[in-house]
């Protein structure tokens, strides 16, 4: 008999997998914009904010200045700082725990945590969703970056539209 996931874990994994799928688009668009696979992965692992990452790649790909890319990414990332204010009571802790929580404070982990009625479920939802999105996003980014050159122009397959669609879906609620 297979083990069943509790509702919080099920929600976290489904959000992680769905969000991670967009990482393929990011990886392919990133290498098409001229970044290497290593640069793409560094951007994904360290920045870990999809909208900001897509903005950097779009600006760099269009020949924009690095300063413009950084400024745009920072402006898009401000919302994560605001989420951090809301999530600090959910996550708690200090030091390394707080630093990891800051990296995982994204739209999805915040939404799943705030959707829970029980404080323990909120904490689990935050951590499980953040970890799932991080893992799936970075794995799929690598896949997209590796196959991006083999696919050719990402616009042929609608990968550029997928990024915009993901951003619109993020704004919908």
Image: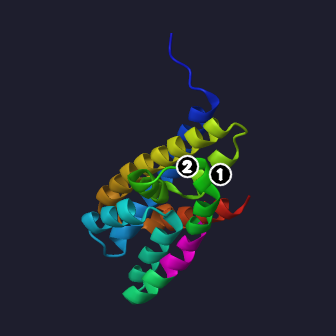
Going 60% across and 58% down the picture, which residue do you hit?
107
62 horizontally vs 82: left or right: left
Q: Is residue 111 magenta?
A: no
**Does any portion of residue 63 appear in the rendered image?**
no
Q: Nearer the viewer, residue 93 or 63?
A: 93
Mark 2 sits on what residue? 91
Q: Which mark is residue 20?
A: none
> Which residues fall within the magenta stretch?
72-79
On screen, residue 165 above or below 122 = below
Mark 1 sits on what residue? 111
Residue 156 in the image: state x and y as whole percent: 46, 66
SS assignment at label 2: helix
On screen, residue 85 above or below 8 = below
Going 55% across and 49% down the picture, which residue do you hit?
91
Going 62% across and 67% down the picture, which residue do you hit?
82
Asked if the residue under mark 2 is in contact with the one under mark 1, i.e. CB atoms within 8 Å, the reply is no
């Amino acid at each position: 008999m297979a083990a069943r996931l509790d509702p919080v874990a099920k929600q976290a994994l489904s959000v992680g997998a769905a969000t991670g799928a967009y990482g393929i688009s990011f990886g392919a668009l990133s290498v098409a914009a001229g970044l290497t696979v290593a640069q793409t992965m560094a951007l994904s692992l360290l920045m870990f904010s999809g909208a900001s990452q897509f903005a950097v790649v779009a600006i760099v790909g269009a020949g924009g200045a690095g300063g413009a890319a950084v400024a745009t990414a920072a402006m898009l990332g401000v919302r994560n700082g605001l989420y951090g204010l809301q999530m600090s009571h959910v996550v708690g802790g200090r030091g390394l725990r707080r630093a990891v929580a800051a990296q995982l404070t994204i739209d999805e982990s915040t939404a799943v945590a705030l959707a829970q009625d029980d404080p323990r479920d909120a904490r689990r939802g935050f951590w499980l969703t953040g970890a799932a999105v991080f893992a799936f996003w970075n794995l799929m980014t690598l896949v997209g970056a590796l196959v991006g050159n083999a696919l050719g122009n990402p616009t042929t397959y609608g990968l550029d539209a997928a990024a915009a669609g993901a951003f619109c879906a993020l704004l919908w609620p």
